[in-house]
Amino acid sequence: MSSPFATTRSFASDNFAGVHPAVMANLQAANLGHAVAYGGDVFTSDAEEQFERIFGAGTKAFFVFGGTGGNVFALSSLCGPGDAVLCSQWSHLHIDETGAPERAGIKLLAVPSADAKVTTKDIERVAGDLGVMHHAQPRVVSLTQPTELGTLYTPEEIEQLCLCAHEHGLLVHMDGARIANATAALGGIASVRSFTVDAGVDVLTFGGTKNGLMYGEAVLYFPQGAARAHTYKDFSQENALRALRYAPYARKQTTQLPSKMRFVSAQFAAVLNNDLWVQLGASANEASASLFEAVHAITSLGLTHSPGVNSLYPTVAPEHADQLREVSFFWDWDTTQHRVRWMTSWDTEQSDVGAFAEAVYRIVT
């Protein structure tokens, strides 16, 4: 089997991709001379202004080191003692963060879901525990957009989920590790508010590492949404605004405050300017769609629908999967069903797709 650390582009994960040249250039610019620590620099101001341009006046951005830390920081600011977070059983929070939220004292209520989405019925069920002192108290609904199965919530679905959550006094967090891919799939930069702040999302973990950055994410708070909404119960609206007041301390307490913050924010400034982040997400999505078009005729793969974003989940016999990994490394997804994951990145080229598709035909058929 080829090494997962091979220098060629693979179909394993968008985490494997390198750094976009614009990001690297801004990192080099940020490295010139001294700058005020902890965010008092021009790169941080630039990135903060760009986030306000995209999501609206009042948006508050907090830059962090990574996705797991960003999620734990966000949820820690939203939850108090005895509180719980509703999420899908497929969520990164539940499966891939080694219990980090729960180590921070946040109980996860993971619900079954065939498509990795949370529903209003899920919210209604857990809301029945509100006020019962023997049960962890539901306080937050966490949505992943796009989901870990490559599915997408529509803006209307998210709006209904936020409405239901707020009516029960719950807040809404969105894990947007691949938000660029979701934005590109749902209509581009003009669409992003429709499934975030305008739909009622309170806090968003905005991904960068999977989309051209070297490292770093941003956690965005939308107090403007809480201030104008009429669906919040009084105490949940206050909790939404309190979370922002507590955010600076929660970030430090969860070890996510970069002292040399300019090296995170400079990367975001590079991709937010001219909406490069959406272009990179679209490029990854297009590569995945091209791979689908190239191989979906092989019926044994079970690929019946063009991907919504940048991932495919075909069925591949283990002996064929091992041979294919000699061509391009990728991960198993569900070994009981012989499903694997093929994921494209911002830098995946048509030549990569063509070469891999040819290998799939040669080996699988």
Image (cartoon, rainbow, N blue to C red):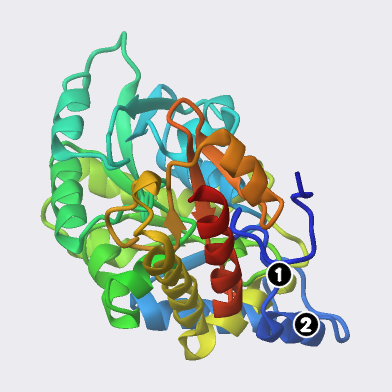
Place of residue 10 in the rendered image (x, y in percent of width and height, measured from the top left): 65, 60
Q: Mark 1 Cα within 10 Å, few/some/many (few <14, many 20+)?
A: some
Amino acid at dot 2: Ala
- Residue drawn at x 67%, y 52% as measured from the top left: 329
Cα distance in 3D space between marks 1 and 2: 19 Å
Place of residue 171 in the rendered image (x, y in percent of width and height, measured from the top left): 29, 44
- Residue drawn at x 46%, y 53% as measured from the top left: 245
Of the residues tagged 1 and 2, which is closer to the observer?
1
Place of residue 125 in the rendered image (x, y in percent of width and height, measured from the top left): 17, 24
Query: What residue is shown with label 1?
Result: 18
Can residue 233 be seen in the rendering of this structure? no
Point out the tag, 1 or 2, that comes first from the N-terminus. 1
| Callout 1: SS | loop
Q: Mark 2 Cα within 10 Å, few/some/many (few <14, many 20+)?
A: many
The correct choice, above or below, for 203 with respect to 93 in the image is below
Residue furthest to the bottom: 274
The correct choice, above or below, for 1 with respect to 298 in the image is above
Q: Quadrant of residue 137?
A: top left
| Callout 2: SS | helix
The correct choice, above or below, for 250 with respect to 79 in the image is below
Marks counted in the figure total 2
Query: What residue is shown with label 2?
Result: 30
Picture quarter with the N terminus: top right
